[in-house]
Amino acid sequence: MHRALFSTPSQMRARVLTSAFLARRSVSPVSLTEVVRRHSNNSNGSGSGRGGRRSSLLRSTTNSNQNHSRIAIDIGENEKKLLLERLLDSESDLNVDLDAGKNEKLELDSEAKRGGGSAAAPPNTNSAPPSNAGDNSDSNSNNNNNSSVQKVSVPKEYPQTLAIPLTRRPLFPGFYKSLYIKDPHVIAAIQSLLDRRQPYVSIFLTKDEKYEPDTLDSPDQVHPVGVFAQITSVYNAGPDDKALTVVVYPHRRVHLDQLLPSQKAAAKADATTVVTASEKSVEEGIGGESTSALAEASAGRTFGTADASSKDTKQELGEEEDELDDGTVDKSGYNPINKHLAAHSVSVVNISNKVDADYDPESPTIKATISEILNVLKEISLMNPLLRDQILTFSIQTGGNAFQDAGKLADFAAAVSSGEPLELQSVLESTSIEERLQKSLYVLKKELANAKLQQEISKEVDKKITRKQQEYFLMEQLKGIKKELGMESDGKDKLVTKFKERAEKLNMPEAIKKVFDEEIGKLQNLEPQASEFNVTRNYLDWLTLIPWGRHSKENFDIKHAMEVLDEDHYGLKDVKDRILEFIAVGKLRGTVEGKIICMVGPPGVGKTSVGKSIARALGREFFRFSVGGLTDVAEIKGHRRTYVGAMPGKVIQALKKVQTENPLIMIDEIDKLGRGHQGDPASALLELLDPEQNSSFLDHYMDVPLDLSKVLFVCTANSLDTIPGPLLDRMEVITLSGYVAEEKVAIAMKYLSPNAREASGLSKEQVELEEGAVEVLIRNYCRESGVRNLKKHVDKVYRKAAFRVVQRSQDEESKKGEKKDGEEPAKLVISKENLKDFVGSPVYTSDRMYDTTPAGVIMGLAWTNMGGSSLYIESVLDSSITESSKPSFHRTGQMGDVMKESSTIAYTFSKAFMAKHFPDNKFFDKASVHMHVPEGATPKDGPSAGTTMTTSLLSLALDTPAIANVAMTGELTLTGKVLKIGGVKEKTIAAKRSGVENIIFPASNKSDWDELPAYIKDGLTPHFVSWYHEIFAIVFPGLQIKK
């Protein structure tokens, strides 16, 4: 389906009017500049043949018998002057009529008027139509140089035409339209019409806006009322010039009476041949001086119906005109003049003119409606310059009379508006002038409302822009006034002075000093309004805030360090010893640079507070930042300065805050580093935490090398498993294990309780927390390895106590009797008996899951990020054993892959152990065994439960429980070898917390046991084994192994 390339906007006015002029002159449309050039050449006698005929548009008339011609075309002022200068140089006389710049119409009259004919003036329409009714001039008496066009007349009745469907909006009489034709059959039919001087079609609006074809299958696809239009110009268009742009001029309204069935030529020529022949005809034309319209179409020329006075045309059309006069119609319904259309698969329709109903121009209703339409057009023209040009052109070209013609005014109002298709079609279908005016007024009113809305939006935007400009000008004026009065110096000079003063107080290296001087010079040459000004200013701000050459004095006093560590922490002897060793080496070397410490331990054991204590012991500034979940490398190495809101990395920010080159920087949660599309922060830390590389650390924002070798980095982590190997290799690991109950009691009484009491505003005279209450609190409420949860409960106890103290005080004040002199309020004592009133019911009601383990249940020991914990292994028989039973083994309890492999090894070893030492026991030959690890919601993994699983399976097979109060850990091989495990201290603390008396470790871990403090080992009996049969002898002392 074709699309309208333009409707009636003023941008196309020049092209449309040019096409109208060319329609009368039968020449190709060319630019005005080309017209002038060709006229100049023709005045010199150049141009011949076909090209000469095309360039005769403004050829000066040298022969006395040439016809009078008029040209009506829109031009600009400069082109108008150029045209006048060119034409005044020729031999023709010109009569120039320029109506004060309103219609910009140039009328050129040639001096040769001997023929007596004159072209009629343009009709009263918005655009000059391609033809007008009138008598022919005596053009036959002219010689061969005559290039005037014969005048044509539009038939008043034309009952059968080619039909073209149109989408989106209908056409109105008197307004040009450009159609885009893609169907090769329709293109061929149009060219056939032009060949026969029948450039008339009917155009109807489709009911479906998405309709694509250029033909109709049913009259129901279009609205019944359309327009009868004349083809004025055709142009090749589309890819490879396979489409056609057709410019039409609607003359009148018509009604679709009948759609004739399409017929194809008997030869059924190949469509490709038709298209190729059509293109060739459009491009090359037919014959030199032939009157074929096809040749004119190929040159972009316009066409009209030949007048009866044209002798040559009569001869060409001879038979067809006779047939038309005869009025005969063939059986298919085609008129003889349209019989050639039957050879094409096109839509041919029978139409009838739709005549406007008579009306009274003096009717008050019509007068009032016309007046309102004119008022609305006036309002819209004040807001829309495009519509104003259209109204002026319409008014001027119609001599102002069109506004008195109610029908044309209604059509004009509808044509220039952007209404809905159905609304515009309703205007087209209205034959009642009064009804048409009302509908056009409604469409115009909607257009006015839309124009007002656009104007309001435009005013709001202009208001905002104007306000910003005013603020800018006022600020500039204010700056100038202050500068003239000496009230304020230039801000840029102040910045330069400030940065230079800062730099003088710093001991910058030469490379840094050079960069500073370059940036200062750049800042002085930049205007404050420049975007780079703020970038340079921020960079200089950071560059001068880094403490170049500033150091804090370090304290390597071992005695002072011990006092600080003991004051801040209880226990942690191994950690304190390692820190004191670290300080002692620093005292001998004079510095502690080049060391990266990583403290690993469960949450709440005091890793961060230990780092603060180290900084206080050394006399260094302390800065901490967390990298948990960090995914952006820019947080470590900074952003590029080109980005908006760019900042240096965390290390540069730390140096700015502490204002020394040798602070202690703590990097928390280094085991929880993320990795995203912005890079891998763990890899960025490799340079930062490498003593061999951080002496020249390069931040992306600063872009200058910084010496971080004097910075002491202390990292914290809960686990070493997630720290990348290369990063872990650069750090010295110090392990902080969990606290035993005795340590937690001491910490609570020495640190947590006094701090919580002070934070609650209480004193020792008001509240006392007994040690027995703290022991119950640790045993029944806070069993984790750290003391963070213990601190929360202690704080809760003192908050409750504060509430009771205040409540009791208010109750006493409200009593009528006065308090006796010297009587002190009773102290609130928190003991293990009333502890429940402060912290609620106990979380843990027993020390362990089983007081006495049954057969198949064994206590193991496990290491977690929270410290050590007890881990039970349960094995049961799925069903009773029968002769038909088959052995099976499955496990549950969220075991990891390694732990599943350990269970498989334990099952295999148990069967081998029973077959070897208890050959009469056929339990595993028929038994279906189910192994479970309690607390199924908690993931578990690791190889150290191998001995525990094997003991559980053997206990089930022998139906014998293990001895009471025993726990074990160790990795088992298929041959029964017990291998070394880790986390001895944590597992020992977990065993002691659970009330275990006997603990079984691999023999390889004896050295780890020996390093444990005595108060941790107190009450425990260790057993160190190398083979499993040693474990069997310990847990099943009453069973004898057959050898």
Image: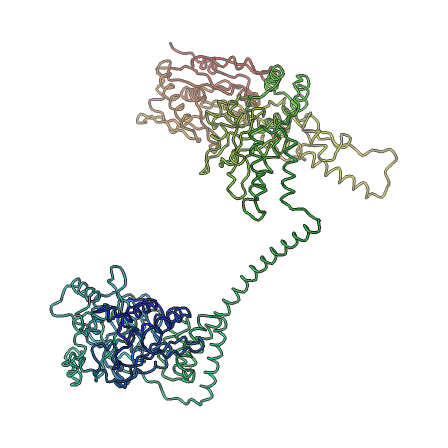
Residue 713: image location, x then y, percent: 57, 26
Quarter in which the C terminus is drawn: top left
Q: Is residue 707 above or below residue 912?
A: below
Asked which quadrant contains residue 544, the reply is top right
Q: Residue at x 37, y 76 (%)?
A: 106
Residue 299: image location, x then y, percent: 24, 68
Asked which quadrant contains residue 740, the reply is top right
> Which residue is most to the right?
821
In the image: residue 722, left or right of residue 554: left
In the image: residue 359, left or right of residue 816: left
Q: In this view of the protein, which residue sits in the foreground, 994 or 1026?
A: 1026
> Which residue is most to the top?
1043
Asked which quadrant contains residue 423, the reply is bottom left
Q: In this view of the protein, which residue sits in the foreground, 668 or 1024?
A: 668
> Which residue is most to the left?
267
Q: In this view of the protein, which residue sits in the foreground, 168 or 1023?
A: 168
Q: In this view of the protein, which residue sits in the foreground, 896 or 602?
A: 602
Residue 938: image location, x then y, percent: 48, 32
Q: Is residue 847 above or below residue 259?
A: above
Q: Is residue 135 above or below residue 1016?
A: below
Is residue 366 at all visible to an observer of this figure? yes
